[in-house]
Image: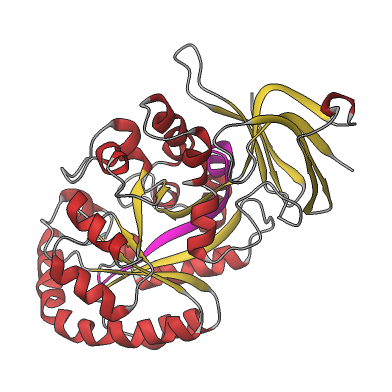
Amino acid sequence: MPALRGHLLIDGADDVVRGVVEWDGDVITRVLTDGDIEAVPAEDVGSALVLPGIIDIHGDAFERALMPRDGVAIDYGLALMANDVQLLGAGITTAYLSATDSWEPGLRSRASLAALVDACAQRATSAPRLEIHVRHERANTDDLEQLEAWIAEGVVTMLSFNDHTDDAISATQIGRTGVSAERFEQLHTDALSQREQGVGQELRLAEVASIASCVTASHDADTIEDLQRDLDLGVAIAEFPTSIELAKRYREHDIAVLLGAPNLVRGTSHLGNLSVREAWASGAGDLLCSDYHYPSLLAAPFCLVEHGIASMGAAWRAVSTVPADVAGLTDRGRLGSGQLADIVVVEPPADRQPPRVRRAVVGGETAFVGP
């Protein structure tokens, strides 16, 4: 049976320990940390870390594969193939593609979402494991039945409630739609008039999601009123609350707080919201996601350790075990007997070099080999 010997992160441990992980088919059969580890038949990875694969439950960097320049669309199959390599190279073995279901035309439209659903269904590979996370915009009130059907059928396995109609219109936003600025202004005005209808539809979507065991989340909560709304909707996750105080309020209600790895690694929010480093240090975060940049999720645990905010064990669990638990994925996120053999071999950062993935194993098969 295949096996790796190296510095393993065992579930619940604060740090890595020398050991062996062994698997048969797509399932881990043994994790050994006692006895003569060096004598166990296994491939030795030296100083590298052997870790459970990263589970990214919110990532929209795939949009750049679909549209590398404003208005320039790439075939979805080709785009997903390129995105798969980026995910595995960042140690992500399970990825939720966070696709927006917006009133906008173009990249974030329902039509684009439908094309993504089809492309995912036609993938010739299962590495990495892909799930579809829909960020439903409140003002998109048309054809709700189609979205409900995807949820009921298990095509969409995570649903976020969003409302970005109050955001300032940007050139980037217009560019991805393929319409003129004048036309976009009219669409935006129409969207504002549809928000009230969308409020009622959210309750209906939440009910459908509950029946289908589809995990629900809220996005960019800014006020106590947002929190109350999310309690009414029964969401399990608060994505990117805009202040530390509000994040803590969500946690008081047993709603997991999801924060962005790029914010953590950069040291600041690109939108001027809370600092993830400060939030995590104050106990206001539960799990991390790639948000808009996959490699940051690989770097994030090491950043937490470097700044004395968390132990290696706690930091890595924030990108593996906790996301698995929050998403209801009981078969992954840990190195343990009976878990899926989704494993990454990582060289830790050294000499000003970032961490790098030497190998990614998905379902017991090597899916990526790095430098």
Q: Residue furthest front?
A: 35
Asked if residue 194 lies in the magenta stretch, the reply is no
Judging depth in this view, the residue of 32 and 99 nearest the camera is 32
Quadrant in which residue 218 is drawn: bottom left
Q: Quadrant of the C terminus?
A: top right
Q: How is the image coloured?
A: secondary structure
Residue nearer the viewer, 14 or 177: 14
Q: Is residue 98 magenta-colored?
A: yes
Residue at 21% in and 76% down? 229
Residue 184 quadrant: bottom left
Estimate the x, y position of residue 98 in percent, counting from the top left.
41, 59
Q: Residue 366 in the image: x percent, y percent?
A: 74, 41
Can you say whether 195 is above or below 360 in the image?
below
Query: Is residue 286 among what the camera can see?
Result: yes
- Residue 285 lies, in percent from the top left, at 34, 49
| Residue projecting furthest to the top | 351
Q: Position of residue 292 (x, y in %)?
A: 36, 46
Quarter containing the N terminus: top right
Number of numbered markers: 0
Q: Residue at x 34, y 44 (%)?
A: 69
Residue drawn at the location 10% of the way across and 66% of the way down: 185
For residue 337, side relative to residue 134 (left or right): right
Over which residues does the magenta segment extend? 85-103
| Horizontal side, residue 9 vs residue 31: left or right | left
The vertical placement of 79 against 91, above or below, is: below
Q: Is residue 243 visible?
A: no
* Res 356 → quadrant: top right
The image shows residue 181, relative to residue 86, as above or below, that is below
